[in-house]
Amino acid sequence: MKMRRLRTPAATVLASLASFIVAAGRLSAAPGAQVVEIKGEIIDTWCYLSGVMGGPDAVVGSAHHTCALWCAAGGIPVGVKAEDGTVYMVLKVKGEDPLAQTDTIMELQSDSIVAKGQHYVRDGVNYLVVADVISNEGITNRNHEDFGVVPGFAIPEKK
Amino acid sequence: MTIKHILQLAAVASSVAVFAHGGVAEDFSNGSNASTFGLSGEQKATFSGKVVDILCELSGDCPENCGDGKRNLGIVRDADNALVMVSKNAQFEFNGGTDDLLPYCNKAVDVDGLLIGEDPGVKAKIYMLQLIRHKGETEWSKAERWGEAWKKRNPGADGEGPWYRRDRRVTKQIDKEGYLGLGLEIDKKWIAENQ
């Protein structure tokens, strides 16, 4: 099984210099935060980090979309997996708390997005308050073609 | 610069990176009665701390009662002041931990469960909460409040089968975009060929 990483602050800084995170325009940084733009995929962080459903390549994208909806509705933290592999725990989306029982987080699940917001780091964990979703390409990771659906019972059998 | 010098520099850089984020987490397994599941980087962990609204802890944006169930909650661990995000409770149907932590908002607690994750540099791995009690009490409560809380949030959602087949927000998305999230036509074709 491949390693999943909650990227360390030092590594995150390097990654930001590399390309994926850029200081963004008009949004002001909150105390203790950095304003960032992050390109990545909305993921179910529990299945991704715990390996409970399989390897990291299988628990993202279209293969895992239904389970990701279940976990988001179940109150499990949603994240953004950036292109460099860094996982950001999402604490708010467009002004909404993540467990507010609205459809916002559900509609974004598994999508490839560019998000702008406030980035906090504590104890090696990256957190993101998404102020805005700048672009959304929908689900671009069509990994069901390789993995089927994960878990296998995601699509109920016909009776 | 020789290869030896490069390796020495790499070792120094590595140690600086570890120092920068506070080093490796302590071992909290002593006295834990948590059930194990063979998850990635799984470690039994029982510790004391304070239940917090994570966003409040990070930013000072602090609604009443830790967000009243709308926010992700965590525990600031007494031993090392680490902010531990609780991602999961003890139930087995895709359930988070907020409903189990909310009654203890800003209170001191003892918890038992599993730390999860494989990055050795992360001081505060995510946590699967299995047992909780007010700090110093003798009786534990199982972290299994989610199911009843979901029923209260979803009156009229009674029916056969697990909650995730009946949840309004889940079914709305699947009805709109399919199980694969790529549209109903792609779903239909894939199901016909594979199930």
Image (cartoon, coloured by chain):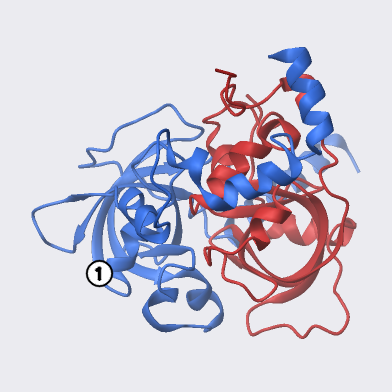
Chain colours: A red, B blue
| Location of residue B177 with respect to B69 vertically, above or below | above
Q: Where is residue B74 in the image (x, y as percent from the top left)?
A: 42, 62
Mark 1 burial class by Cα count in 10 Å: few <14, some 14-19, many 20+:
many
Q: The numbered mark 1 sits on a residue in which chain?
A: B
SS label for mark 1: strand
Rendered position, A32 above or below A38 = below
In the picture, which quadrant includes the C terminus of chain B? top right
Residue B122 at least partly seen: no
Between B168 and A123, which is closer to the camera in this rendering? B168
Where residue B91 appears, as percent x and y from the top left, is 35, 40
> In the image shown, does B111 or B93 lie closer to the viewer?
B93
Residue B183's x, y, as percent?
A: 81, 39
How many numbered marks, from 0 up? 1
The N terminus of chain B lies in quadrant: top right
Please determine whether, in this image, residue B148 is positioned above or below residue A1. below
Q: Nearer the viewer, residue B168 or B110?
A: B168
| Amino acid carrying mark 1 in the image | Ala
Please state if B41 lies on the left or on the right of A56 as rendered. left
Horizontally, residue B52 falls left or right of residue A51, namely left
Residue drawn at (32%, 75%) of the image: B106
The image position of residue B41, as x and y in percent, is 49, 35
Q: Which residue is drawn at 73% across and 55% down?
A: A108
Q: Name the residue under label 1.
A: B108
Whether residue A157 sits left or right of residue B27 in the image: it is: right
Judge by depth and name the residue closer to the eye, A109 or A125.
A109
Residue at 58% from the left image edge and 60% from the top image edge: B21
A130 on left or right of B97: right
Answer with the quarter of the image where residue B184 lies: top right
> Can residue B16 be seen in the rendering of this structure?
yes
